[in-house]
Image (cartoon, rainbow, N blue to C red):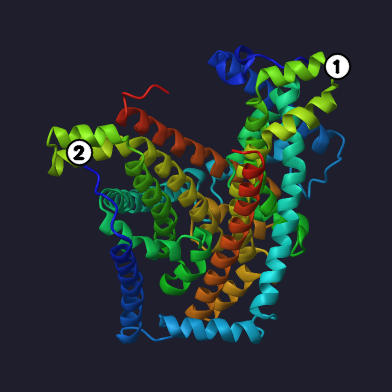
Amino acid sequence: MLEPRLDPARFLALSAAGAASFFLFWSAAALAGLTSREFLPAPWDVAARFSQLAVEPFAGFTLFQHLLSSFQRFAFGFVLAVAIGIPLGLLMAWFRWIDRIVAPVFEAVRFIAPIAWVPFAALWFGTGIGGPVLIIFMGAFPAVLINTYRGAKNVERKYIEASQMLGASSWRSMTEVLLPAAVPSIVAGLRISAGLGWQSLVGAELIVASSGVGYLMVKGQAAVSTATVMSGMIAIGVVGLLIDVALRRVQQLIETRRGL
Amino acid sequence: MVPRGADANAATRHPLARLAHALAVLAGVILLWHLLTAVFGVISPARFPTPAEVAASLQQIVVEGYSNARLHEHVLRSVLLVTMGFVVASSFGVALGLAMGASRKVEAFVNPIFLLLRPIPPLAWIPLAIVWLGLGDAAKIMVIFVAAFVPSVINSYTGVRQIDRPIFEASAMLDVTGWRYWREVLIPGALPSIFTGLRLSLQASWTTLVAAELIGAVAGLGQILNQAAQDIYPAMIVVGMVSVALSGWLMTLGLAWIEHRAMPWRVR
């Protein structure tokens, strides 16, 4: 039989013990003196480095400036993926001939990992903003398109039939029937694609960029400064989490408004 | 223009018809590509290669080799690395996930560590792996491990939690305990979700490996891409990208085959 829930006090105590043992183990490994502190810093070394990076420029900028430039690229690529993905998904759901032309091409291209576009990103855009944006787009686009398409395909037939009987044009059926009905699925897709886009961006910045958190980490790696690399990892994790929390709020708002 | 019924849906048509359709579209794309690059020159060959150039590069890498090795050697190297990292990581991951699902105490203890590490994308571990382990295989196995570990834990864990209550109640009534409880209740019940996790793990580890090889490697598919980018050799970049996609696709198919064998009771 599945165990009953633990009472909250015990659950909390065990969770605290879990987190504590993680940091204890880490600190012990760092302090054991098997490696240098540069190679394996203690948790407080990373915290100190993090706050230092927040005020002192490293690799040209402070941590927050790096984050800002990463986030701008992310926003650019993500908006582009949404702006193309949602209309294309609706068109594919409505016009069968578009579906039949686009779907095989899309399925084939989707199998190329976003990061594999890095060489072309470098070739086409150099170190300009276009390169990272291309990679984010490739990471974020599939989930937007698939979820829009699925959402629009699952619209109940009676709504479509009703709108057609009332003489709605293709344009009106798509914007006033398919789109609103697909919104919950689209928003779910946005959360997935934002996560994938943010990840792909970080990967892209490791290779083609001269600013951004990924670039900061590469510079930290070159300087064999583990604390810098870990600070970058923390910053990436926190921003990724914030993006997800923001989109989850949007999702909840939409679901409450629709009484789901 | 009238919305189609489910019968005309692409997914339900005859497999051969779907294949023929896909091939026709593929041929159309290649023709359009040829026209745009080689015939009308709308796209400059310095930016994107012609189909003929790609075919020549493919021949070059298959026969003579490129960037230290021939194509099959690059593919084999990458696929072997991913398989090794993936098998090790997912074995640990599935075991931990099942333990977290079965025991509230393990869940309470491990969850906070997970909550800390989970938001960090696998690709962000690459610089750390390089600092610690250098540019060799060890660093690659470390990033593959990280990439594959998280999804397999999460999905095994939710898999156990999604098993229907009546199954637990029946197994308790029949006094199924110990090893039998794991082998006949928990694992089969969680298996569909476990395989979802394995698929995500495999995709994540493949992407991460390609990224790690792009940053530094002696051979491997990412290394083809890296070398081709440095040589400004667009046709070879396309060969590298297609090889990455095809190998990833074949590995996913392999996993789907294992999934089918592992769960013969599931009709897909």
**x, y percent for residue B134:** 44, 71
Q: Nearer the viewer, residue A15 or B204?
A: A15
Task: Provide the residue designation for mark 2.
Answer: B183
Q: Compared to A119, does B36 lie above or below?
A: above
* Label annotation for residue A167: 1
Q: Position of residue B114 (x, y in %)?
A: 40, 61
Mark 2 and mark 1: span between their CA atoms? 59 Å
- At a point 60% along the width and 12% down the height, the residue shown is B7
Q: Quadrant of the C terminus of chain B?
A: top left
> Quarter-wise, where is residue A105 in the image?
top right
**Going 56% across and 16% down the picture, which residue do you hit?**
B12
Residue at 33% across, 62% down: A8
User: Looking at the rendering, which quadrant does residue A42 occupy?
Assistant: bottom left
Position of residue B109 relative to residue A155, above or below, is below
The chain ID associated with circle 1 is A
The mark total stands at 2
Q: Which amino acid type is shown beneath numbered disc 2?
A: Arg
Left or right placement of residue A17 versus residue B243 in this view:
left
Position of residue A248 in the picture relative to residue B39 (left or right): left
Image coords of residue A219 (percent x, y): 59, 76
**Up/down of A101 relative to B190, above or below:** above
Q: Determine crowd level at label 2: few under 14, some 14-19, many 20+ residues with C-alpha closer than 10 A.
A: few
In percent of width and height, residue B108 lies at 32, 60
- The residue at the point 26 percent across, 51 percent down is B99
Q: Which numbered marker is on residue A242?
A: none
Q: Nearer the viewer, mark 2 or mark 1?
A: 1
